[in-house]
Image (cartoon, grey):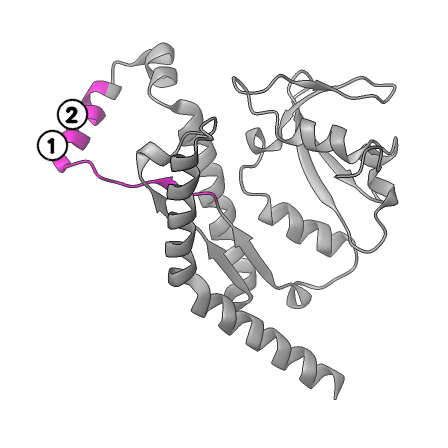
Amino acid sequence: MAEGIRINDIKDKHLLILAYDFINRELITFKNGRGHDASYNPTLAEICDSATAAPTLYPPVRTTDATGRWLIDGAIATNDPSLCAITEALAMGYTINDIWMLSMGTGRPVQDLSQKQQDKIGSASRDWGIVGWLSNGLLDHMLSASSAVSAHQCSQLLGSRYVRVDGTLPRSLMKLDETSHAYVKNMKGEASRWYEMFHRDITSMVDNFTKEKSSASD
């Protein structure tokens, strides 16, 4: 990324990037040429730092505008921003039938627990309290639930014009801060597996999109 490039310098595509103001509890939307949250025209570096500042891994980012907001990863507000993209397209004047979407997920833990193990955890959860829930992945559950709701709503709105690429990952590959060669190699292997799972759905949607656009132009 060239140093100093600002969001409004991007002219050939529309950008929508999300962050979260954790002090004022507000969703922040960065857009090029639209929306008050991009009016101070921040650098793409500032936006990317803000939108990926995952709590416990990276520090919050103070914006350089006059407001001076403190931002963290937009996933806190919406872990799957697909629905935000749909509403943004509608606000720009497109109709729901104009929208085709390929949504890319980042994986969820494989369900490898026996029924006995599930029941043990379920019974123990009745007495967890706030500390127990936090130590047993409350934040992860909230993020997964947010993604599931978004995927359901997008599927209902778009039908066959929507493909969601997502799948399970071994729990050993769910570490956001792991960058070893072996870890990355295993992640690439999982990506290849997902490609085999979804490439027909993606190809079919692209073909249908091409046919519809071709018919509309005749």
From what the image shows, is residue 158 above or below residue 143?
below
As shown in the figure, which amino acid type bears the numbered disc 1? Lys
In this view, the residue in front, 95 or 33, is 33
From what the image shows, is residue 118 above or below residue 32?
above
Q: How many marks?
A: 2
From what the image shows, is residue 87 above or below residue 156?
above
- Name the residue: 56% across, 33% down: 75
Q: Which mark is residue 80?
A: none
Q: Residues within 10 Å of mark 2 (few under 14, many from 20)?
A: few
Q: Residue 177 at x, y = what percent?
A: 47, 26
As shown in the figure, which amino acid type bears the numbered disc 2? Lys
| Magenta stretch in the rendered image | 106-124
- Name the residue: 87% across, 34% down: 41
Q: Are marks 1 and 2 in contact (CB under 8 Å)?
A: yes
Q: Which mark is residue 120?
A: 2
Residue 96, by quadrant, is bottom right
The secondary element bearing badge 1 is classed as: helix
Residue 209, by quadrant, is bottom right
Q: Residue 31 at x, y = what percent?
A: 78, 42
151 is within the stretch colored magenta? no
Q: Which mark is residue 116?
A: 1
- Name the residue: 88% across, 19% down: 66
- Name the residue: 67% across, 36% down: 18
Query: Which quadrant of the figure contains the N terminus?
Result: top right
